[in-house]
Amino acid sequence: MRQDIRDRSRDLLRDDKLQDNLRRALGHTLDRRAALVAENPGWAELRDRARDLRDESLRRLPELRAQVERQVRGRGGGFHFCRDAAEARARVIEILDRAGAVEVVKGKSMVSEEIALNAALEARGIAVFEGDLGELIVQLRGERPAHITAPALHLDRRQIAALFRRALGQDVDDDPVRLAAAARRFLRPHFLGADAGITGANFVVAESGSVVLVENESNIRLATTLPRLHIAITGIEKLVPRLADLAPLLALLPVSATGQKASAAVSILGGPRPSGEDDGPREFHLVLVDNGRQALISDPILRPALRCIRCGACLNVCPVFQRIGGHGYGAIYPGPIGVVLARALLGRSDGAHAFACSLCGACDEICPVQVPLSRLILEVRRRAQQDAGVTAERMAHAAFAEMAQWPRLFKMALAASRAAIRWWPRWFSTSLTGGWTDLRAWPRPRRDGELRRRTGSGAT
Ligand code: SF4
């Protein structure tokens, strides 16, 4: 049976270990971020600049795309624009086949999750090894990432140690340094032996045709320099016009994502190794994926979702994500931004994720590029209702609106509901208001005029 977010949430809320892991991981990140923001008097201006830059990029996307293509091809790289996930998967496989690649190491890439790249490569007989520690952990568990920037935040080090003992055959305890060393022992031969490295891109600079990659583990540096072929795959919205635009974006990203002032490594890569140089891949390809993004740019209301720089801060601060984690959503992109992207990019139309949102607005306040998430989530709800057509709930609202215009009828209906709640409380809460009353008591209905007597006012 297909589970929805409510079914999954019931199980996840009972998982004490998950609740502990989420509380600890998200709490630390949010505390560190808050301290860094507090000591930066220019934070608000940085957010304004970043928002304006992202909007400029989205306005100029066709022109920037042409500029990137010229730059990448001019330096001997391959440039590919793919309309959808199937085309992107086919293009990557074609490049790997032409290079005779049978083993790939990957850097973290949400677009590769979006287009289900790993499964396609494995079906083609190409072995894939995730090089990011968190991604390796979820790959070994056969799971999707639980977070945009912290794929394994739902696990603690004891669970990871048990996984490494089982899946990697390594005799390791839960000391973080020894866990990292175990992952390194397993991955190092693959970095050295892989035919190709596949990464995402945090940004792609149009004026230079450079791919910008932000990381903490340096696995991306290995994946982009050791194998003879590097493929960078990302969404078209990641283009920025100028190198100088990176300054505000790179100042906001690590603070928002992991509560760090700066990431351990930022790589700005310019394509294949020039002749006479010893470093870098011999072959380089940039794959830009549309997969619904052009349509989203033309959407006057949901378009600001494409400002997103995938920092994950809106997930960290979201009270729903804090309780159910990324897997509760059952979606590629979880959390507030995932609610919007699920509808706008991936064509999910049931709106269940949008209705799980409490509309507290914390995501609006934390987003470094000012994506107005609660406004967009409300719009996703509105469209989901529209798609659903005439539902029992809509008919009930219409009937209520009609009845509210006839005072005598309204009073009779109130009296009838009071009696129903009083005499058949279980039926009322399970049949009519199920969901609202599962975890909270239905308020006792007041008698006619009770409020007026209690407050002494004319209000009812
Ligand atoms: S919507 Fe904003 S806060 Fe959420 S991931 Fe994107 S940039 Fe970060």
Image (spheres, rainbow, N blue to C red):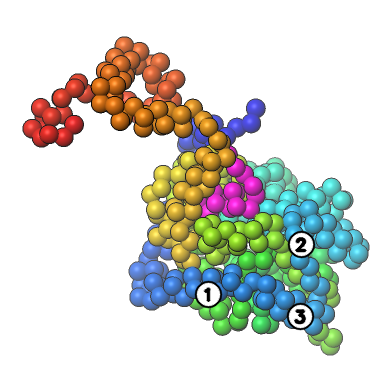
**x%, y% of residue 45?**
40, 75
Look at mark 3 in the image and give the residue it sits on. Answer: 70
Cα separation between marks 2 and 3 = 17 Å
Q: Quadrant of residue 305?
A: bottom right
**x%, y% of residue 301?**
51, 57
On residue 224, the disc is none
Give the residue type at disc 3. Answer: Arg
Residue at x 63%, y 66% (from the top left corner): 237
Residue 340 lies in magenta, yes or no? Answer: yes
Residue at x 83%, y 56% (from the top left corner): 90
Residue at x 42%, y 58% (from the top left corner): 364
**Which class describes the residues within 10 Å of circle 3: few (<14), some (14-19), or many (20+)?**
some
Query: Can residue 122 be seen in the rendering of this structure?
Result: yes
Look at mark 1 in the image and give the residue it sits on. Answer: 53
Between residues 283 and 114, which one lies in front from this camera angle? 114
Q: Looking at the image, tell me whether mark 2 or mark 1 is earlier in sequence order.
A: 1
On residue 82, the disc is 2
Residue 459 vs residue 294: left or right? left
**Which class describes the residues within 10 Å of circle 1: few (<14), some (14-19), or many (20+)?**
many
Residue at x 54%, y 57% (from the top left corner): 302
Q: Quadrant of residue 103?
A: bottom right
